[in-house]
Amino acid sequence: MTPLETIRANADLAVQSAREQLRVSLSFDRSGVEWLDGHLNRLVGKLSPEAQDGVVNVMGSFLGECIVQAHGGEWIEESGAWLVQVKRVYAVTVDVSGKVKKQLSGIEGESVLSLFDFAVEVAESGGGFATRK
């Protein structure tokens, strides 16, 4: 499998696991990210480091696919890491797995939902965080 195929398979695994284990129907849009935001908050402090790494990998893929599908973003590889880029008037690149890890670690103010909204807002307005495309 290519890295992008693995990312997409992990995103699909998130949807399948949520449906089978939690009876939650997820979609690759803002409502899916809203659920993910609350789910990560409920998991803070409850996972072993190994389990946390797995959640970061799978849910980072899910978050990225939500941004790709809802905002027309794309996966890009940069310095060995897979990031999501949204291009409008400006281009903004976000580290979805890093954001999941920060929120799952319980860092105050970290939210995957805010990243989801932030990515498209900055791509449209710049806000000092993006480059002209």
Image: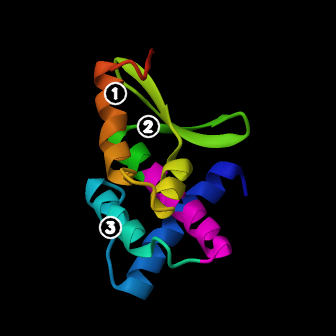
- Asked where in the image residue 128 lies, by quadrant, the reply is top left
Residue at 54% across / 57% down in the picture?
Answer: 101
The residue under label 1 is: 122
Question: Which dot, 2 or 1, sits closer to the camera?
Answer: 1
**Residue 1 showing in the rendered view:** yes
User: In this image, 12 relative to 23: left or right?
Assistant: right
Main SS of the magenta part reads: helix
The residue under label 2 is: 73
Say few, some or many: other residues with alpha carbon within 10 Å of mark 3 (under 14 / 14 to 19 / 20 or more): few
The amino acid type of the residue labelled 2 equals Gly
User: In this image, 112 relative to 77: left or right?
Assistant: left
Alpha-carbon span between mark 2 and mark 1: 13 Å
Frontmost residue, 6 versus 83: 83
Quadrant of the image containing the N terminus: bottom right
Sooner in the amino-acid sequence: mark 2 or mark 3: 3
The amino acid type of the residue labelled 1 equals Val
Frontmost residue, 95 versus 74: 95
